[in-house]
Image: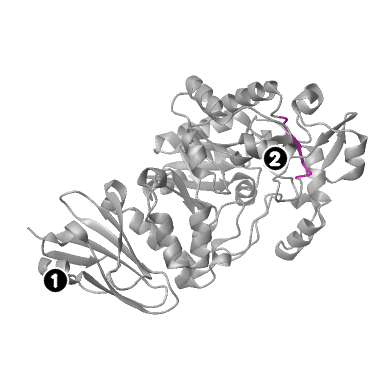
Amino acid sequence: MQQLYELNVRTWTNERSTELGRTATLDDLPDSWLEHLAEHGFTWLYLLGVWPCGVLTRAVSLADVPLRQYLVSVLPGASDADVIGSPLAPSSSQCDAILGGDEALERLRERARSFGLSLMLDFIPNHVGLDHPWVIEHPELFVRGDEQVIARDPSAWVRLNGSIFAHGRDPFFAPWQNTVQFDYANPAVHDAVIAMAADVAARCDGLRCDVAMLLLPDVFQSTWQRPMRSFWKRCLDEVRALHPGTLFMAEVYWNREYELQQAGFDFTYDKILYDRLLSGDPESIKGHLRANLDYQMHCVRFMENHEEQRAAARFPNPSHHRGALFITGMVPGMLLCHYGQEDGRSLHSSLHARRRPPEAGSDAHRNAYRDLLLLLGEPARQDGTWSMVEARDCPSIIGLLWTLQSHHSLLVVINISWNPAVGNLNLGPLAQRDCQIQDVFKSIPPRLLDGTSLRERGLPIELPACGTAAYRILPQR
């Protein structure tokens, strides 16, 4: 089982600096916090924001009126000093000197390893920031235009050092005006970006690959009207040859997850589950979870990340949030938890800012996260095998079952509806014996159920709207 914690190091160091009364670096991330992550089952620490951001890139953020309006609304005393530019428009792949540089990053990596934590960093293959030296030294690596294109669409192009370059973009959104787009029609770009990936991999154990689907040949050609050769398999193979064991995680959308898994990615974002949890449609959620187990084992499940709004904001009803959170954590794959999610925060933390909005968070959302951590620590969840069980007579009830062979099982049950639900879960092979049922959260005392009843009628379940329950099931000898 893999669990990943995403830490925005730029907002964290700002808060840590206030605590210490001096500028904090990665060396100031306490061992006690790393130990806390490990004790709660986390296996990965993903550091967002270790690459530096240049003056030109920051200037784009400073000129972003909607961004400034948002920051004024959520940050007391917001000023220019709060705007530091996007970490996803880097000026280099060397750790930012203000964080202690590559030396502090390496020390943190070694400390994390001592607690059983692997380190993940961003690899941004689609573009670089406006200040990246390659824009001046190797302009041939980027999509370039002429006076006509910049006159026709000045928001999509930028003039730098006498040349006109395209901004990076997702074809469904406005161009990222703090970036310059690589031209993957040029084979030299493949060589340069793979070398960049290997350079990043030398500093960590895994790479989160930003907007990975943009580098699929058909997507790139559709966006830029330029043909490109396949990139990802060669990239992953060559980096792993230099740095064996490197894990690759793809940020991916548009139902291209399986394709990138086939190209060699260890994990791919599962935005599909997130969207279906938001919709609350039981059959669509269960349909997604009926997919091939090998596919599911390589999915990254999340309720929020640095791109999405806070879970407490998208799932404001505490019961709906709790049920969705339990599904996210109790299915196969990698679980991603985001900095501040554990507090039940609801205000989005801008990637362009050094401060996150101050807020107390929600006790109900915080308690759901605490209870999820309890479930994640259960032996059956750690080392068991997974299956989904369904109610014979109630489509809104879903059971997520983790079984330790010849020992016991953990069953988490969720009512995926806004109405009370009553049904009977089919426990399959578990119903071959009498069983003791223990409530993990001790809201009801243990009870014995005979095997005949379990086989004939199933496990009786009664839940309120969006209700949840968690049981240990111990077959009797």
Query: What amino acid is at disc 1?
Result: Ser
Residue 98 image position (x, y, % from top left): 68, 37
Density class for disc 1 (Cα within 10 Å; few <14, some 14-19, many ≥20) is some
Residue at 63% x, 50% y: name it: 11
Which secondary structure class fits the magenta region best? loop
- Please identify the quarter of the rendering in which residue 393 is found: bottom left
Gap in angstroms between the C-alphas marked 1 and 2: 59 Å
Which residue carries the number 1 mark?
453
Q: Which residues are magenta?
A: 176-183
Q: Is residue 362 left or right of residue 331?
A: right
- Residue 103 inside the magenta-drawn segment: no
Secondary structure category for the residue under label 2: helix
Residue 323 image position (x, y, % from top left): 42, 66
For the C terminus, the quadrant is: bottom left
- Looking at the image, is mark 1 or mark 2 nearer the viewer? 2
Residue farthest toward the left in the current orientation of the protein? 477
Secondary structure category for the residue under label 1: helix
Q: Nearer the viewer, residue 72 or 332?
A: 332
Which residue carries the number 2 mark?
222
Q: Nearer the viewer, residue 139 or 427?
A: 427
Q: Is residue 108 left or right of residue 283?
A: right
Q: Is residue 131 left or right of residue 283?
A: right
